[in-house]
Amino acid sequence: MSHPASTTLAASPPRQLAAVAAASRAAQAARPAFGRGWRRYGLAFAGWTLAGVVLMQQARLTGGGQEAGWVIKMFVDMWIWALFTPAIMDLGRDYPVDRARWVSRGLLHVASALAFALLDAVLMWSLQPYLGGSAPQLGLATEFARRLFANEASYLVLVAIGIAARHAEEARDRQLAAAALATELADAKLAALNAQLRPHFLFNTLNAIAELVHVDAQAADRTVTALGGLLRRSLAAGDRQEVPLREELACVDEYLAIVATRLDERLTVSTAIAPDVLDAKVPSFLLQPLVENAVRHGVERTADGGRVEIAAWRDGEWLRVEVRDDGAGLRHTSNGPNGPNGPNGARPGGVGLRTTRERLRHLYGDAQAFELRAASADGGRRGAVAAVRLPFSPTVS
């Protein structure tokens, strides 16, 4: 058996993206309590200090700002506004000016801007005797008027940043909600596909039992017992979309025990499973439709029966699974929607293969491949090969 060369993983599975979206939502839920704590004040102090350094350098380049008292007053004023910054940004985020409430919100921010400007003037006027410098102390009204323009401009900038942060959070919320909705839709689709796949297998097996009842009652009884074991495994899997490969192989063994009662010596089964992939994730009920397709449309269509081979191995980032048969091949297929040249690439009646293809697409997006090809392309053998490529994941939660 030829093992194709390693291929780089092309895309992240949608379910992995869903997990990322869930983690992002959890982080966002925890953000307000942390984001409104001391970290915001630290960032505000760092930002205003940097602004003070820039203003000081500009003043020196223009020949001013050399007096130590002026530098101290400037940085004290900057740090006062650093204390104001989180509250003002919260006002912008929590009370944005929108079309429906622009008058009330506008008046709110005008009043808030004047209040912060007055508070800044009061603090600076109160601290002025302790900050040094040769300039005479100004009156409170003069201090307020002198600082009003700069203070109002600072308030507007901080409110704008708060409004921008609100819009960013809303955009992130919409993105996360869309991701959550897409995940829910994908899960619903997968549940529907599972609901379609299992009855399909069950009806086929019951039809086989109905045929055996008339020719071999004991074989029919053994088949019913084997079917019970397979159904127990299926129920034990529950709603899990992915299971360890070893579980899938056990289900296939149960299915082959059912098939063996009908085909007897006409069917030979062999496996080539690499030990390091037994615990790898695979979709539940992945192998059974592939094996059923090989048996019903390959081995059973030849007079002397045939062989079914199941192989799985790791190929770099990928897990590769193949089910081969040396039966009738694809010669009897049509070019209709279920033929080898049709979009589903399945043999006639390939409901299981079509469902498997859809489940792979919903589980892994573009990071998967499913192909049904003639075995004649692999060393001149007859029969068919169902080949699946999945992202390799060694553990199952």
Image (cartoon, grey):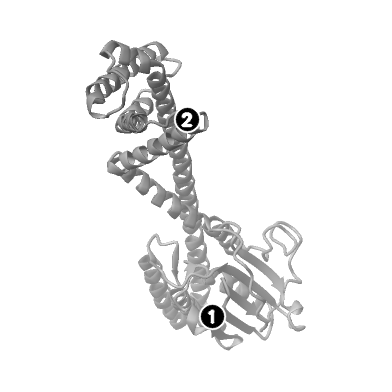
Give me the residue at 36% from left, 23% from top.
95
Q: Residue at x 51, y 77 (%)?
A: 212
Q: Residue at x 66, y 75 (%)?
A: 385
Q: Estimate the x, y position of residue 232 in percent, counting from the top left.
A: 37, 70
Can residue 221 be seen in the rendering of this structure? yes
- The amino acid type of the residue labelled 1 equals Arg
Q: Quadrant of the N terminus?
A: bottom right
Name of the residue lying farthest toward the front:
134
> Is 156 placed above or below 199 here?
above
Q: Can you tell which quarter of the image residue 311 is in?
A: bottom right
Q: Is residue 258 above or below residue 14?
A: below
Per the rendering, the mark at residue 262 is: 1
Give the secondary structure at mark 1.
helix
**Residue 377: mark:** none
For the residues marked 1 and 2, what is the alpha-carbon distance in whole angstroms? 95 Å
Q: Which circle, 1 or 2, is nearer the viewer?
A: 2
- In this picture, is 21 found above or below 167? below
Residue 238: image x %, image y %?
A: 37, 62
User: For the residue marked with disc 2, what is the amino acid?
Assistant: Ala
Residue 75 position, x and y percent, is: 35, 33
> Badge 1 local density, few (<14 within 10 Å), some, or many (20+)?
some
Q: Report whether 23 appears left or right of 371.
A: left
Q: Badge 2: how crowded within 10 Å, few (<14), some, or many (20+)?
A: some
* Secondary element at image label 2: helix
**Residue 200 pos. (x, y %):** 52, 62
The residue lying toward the viewer, choosing from 7 and 361, is 7
Q: Nearer the viewer, residue 77 or 303?
A: 77
Q: Is residue 216 among the parts visible in the rendering?
A: no
Q: Which mark is residue 59?
A: 2
User: Looking at the image, is mark 1 or mark 2 earlier in the sequence?
Assistant: 2
**The C terminus - image quarter:** bottom left
